[in-house]
Image (cartoon, rainbow, N blue to C red):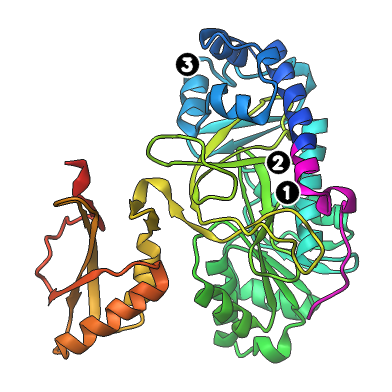
């Protein structure tokens, strides 16, 4: 189903990496100067650190001296200074839209902000394969949050016609996809799968009755197996985008697949999720980013809490030179690093769910002597060949997480009811 190799912004998407970094830094310097001048919050925190914008002369200076901002900081700032806190950097008369996100956090937009936001997503959707003339079923919420309206207008910039379906009513979505001959589905992965199931419940066969060729998904941690299953279920290419409500679009998957290209207009880095220490470009860690889309409420060096594996640095077959990130592994707070490798509950679960005889599990990390140890305790529901199952699981887990774990099998009901999925005993 691959289409032509076209670009939304060829200059940026195919720019040599070092040149791109310089371009990003120049934009970043202007953004920091703007925030320092216009936002009381940024002026205060930089003065507290005795840092002026002119002191930041390179990306290394930025990584070393510029403080993080987090969701909790945004929530507390607006709670203390309602409604928009002291991050606001424009006169209220310039605001045109206000959205709410979990927290709650209220995100204000000027007309310029909104145009930038929708343009970023239009870039992503075009790169995923959406084209002028497509009919798109947008299945995310249109109320309070920015998702529905922003994505709707982004597809409009690509030249698509949009069905503003919103969430829920999966059977209605299935009927309308058939009747309108929709070609693109924009959804959370779980809801996209639900639409396929709903279609079969009402006597439709997605493989014969749907005209879909592309599903663009976002917002949930999922496995490669589930992505392939969705592709088979709806007979579509599945492409993914990644962003956060606070940041806007960060990365998108091109028609070649195999990871998400970083948007060249975003300063992207990873940090150690425990210490916050900046990591060399390309190393796995917690995603931190600045996207420049918000003039009303600048958000600089935002810690997302999302953990990602190592970047792919080589030029993609599509011709884009921007680095590619793999799928999100999970939340940094739920993950342990063992012998330099992140152990993610979701990856362990991917292995265990292959075996219906198995049930609850717990990841146990320890450091009894000089090295970290990793054990996976797993309950079994019925009689099994314990040694055979252990060896099978050791091999499967090694393939999935790139570590050899000790597997401890125990009868169902052995684990405490309140046992956490991750027991990191190195903290004690």
| Disc on res. 266 | 2
Q: Is residue 62 above or below residue 222?
A: above
To which residue does mark 1 refer? 263
Q: Residue at x 69, y 79 (%)?
A: 236
Return the residue nearer the eye: 267 or 153.
267
State the SS at label 2: loop
Q: Residue at x 58, y 68 (%)?
A: 169
Give coordinates of residue 179: x percent, y percent: 77, 79
Spatial CA distance of label 2 from label 1 is 6 Å
State the SS at label 3: helix
**Earlier along the polypeptide chain: callout 3 or callout 1?**
3
In the rendered picture of this protein, how many numbered marks are placed on residues? Answer: 3
State the SS at label 1: loop
Q: Residue at x 47, y 16 (%)?
A: 80
Give coordinates of residue 401: x percent, y percent: 39, 67
Magenta stretch contains residue 106? no
Q: Is residue 196 left or right of residue 331?
A: right
Local crowd at mark 3 within 10 Å, few (<14), some, or many (≥20)? few
Give coordinates of residue 304: x percent, y percent: 52, 41
Residue 353 is at least partly visible in this image = no
Magenta stretch contains residue 18? yes
To which residue does mark 3 refer? 80
* Disc 2 to disc 1: CB gap under 8 Å: yes
Spatial CA distance of label 3 from label 1 is 34 Å
Q: Is residue 166 above or below residue 392?
A: above
Q: Which quadrant of the figure contains the N terminus?
A: bottom right
Q: Is residue 44 above or below residue 127?
A: above
Provide the residue span drawn in magenta: 1-21
Return the residue nearer the eye: 422 or 219.
422
């Amino acid at each position: 189903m691959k289409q032509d190799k076209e670009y939304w912004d060829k200059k940026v998407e195919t720019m040599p990496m070092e040149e791109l970094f310089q371009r990003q830094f120049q934009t970043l310097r202007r953004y920091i100067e703007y925030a320092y001048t216009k936002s009381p919050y940024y002026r205060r925190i930089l003065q507290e650190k005795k840092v002026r914008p002119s002191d930041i002369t390179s990306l290394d200076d930025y990584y070393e001296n510029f403080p993080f901002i987090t969701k909790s900081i945004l929530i507390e700032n607006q709670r203390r200074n309602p409604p928009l806190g002291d991050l606001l950097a424009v006169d209220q008369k310039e605001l045109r839209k206000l959205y709410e996100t979990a927290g709650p956090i209220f995100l204000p937009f000027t007309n310029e902000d909104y145009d930038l936001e929708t343009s970023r997503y239009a870039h992503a959707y075009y790169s995923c394969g959406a084209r002028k003339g497509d009919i798109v079923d947008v299945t995310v919420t249109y109320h309070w949050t920015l998702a529905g309206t922003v994505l709707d207008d982004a597809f409009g910039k690509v030249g698509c016609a949009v069905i503003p379906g919103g969430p829920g009513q999966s059977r209605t979505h299935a009927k309308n996809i058939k009747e309108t001959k929709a070609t693109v589905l924009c959804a959370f992965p779980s809801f996209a799968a639900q639409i396929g199931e709903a279609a079969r419940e009402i006597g439709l066969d997605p493989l014969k009755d749907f005209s879909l060729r592309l599903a663009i998904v976002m917002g949930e941690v999922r496995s490669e197996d589930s992505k392939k299953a969705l592709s088979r279920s709806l007979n579509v290419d599945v492409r993914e985008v990644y962003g956060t409500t606070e940041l806007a679009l960060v990365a998108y998957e091109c028609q070649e697949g195999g990871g998400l290209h970083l948007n060249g207009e975003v300063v992207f880095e990873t940090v150690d999720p425990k210490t916050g220490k900046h990591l060399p470009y390309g190393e796995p860690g917690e995603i931190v980013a600045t996207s420049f889309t918000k003039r009303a409420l600048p958000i600089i060096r935002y810690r997302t809490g999302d953990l990602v594996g190592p970047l792919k640095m080589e030029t993609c077959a599509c011709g884009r030179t921007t680095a590619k990130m793999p799928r999100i592994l999970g939340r940094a707070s739920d993950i342990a690093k063992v012998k330099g490798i992140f152990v993610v509950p979701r990856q362990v679960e991917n292995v265990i769910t292959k075996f219906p005889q198995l049930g609850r599990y717990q990841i146990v990390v320890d450091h009894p002597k000089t090295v970290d140890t990793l054990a996976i305790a797993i309950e079994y529901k019925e009689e099994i060949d314990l040694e055979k199952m252990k060896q099978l699981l050791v091999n499967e887990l090694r393939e999935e997480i790139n570590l050899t774990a000790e597997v401890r099998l125990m009868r169902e009901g052995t684990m405490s009811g309140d046992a956490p999925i991750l027991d990191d005993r190195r903290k004690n």
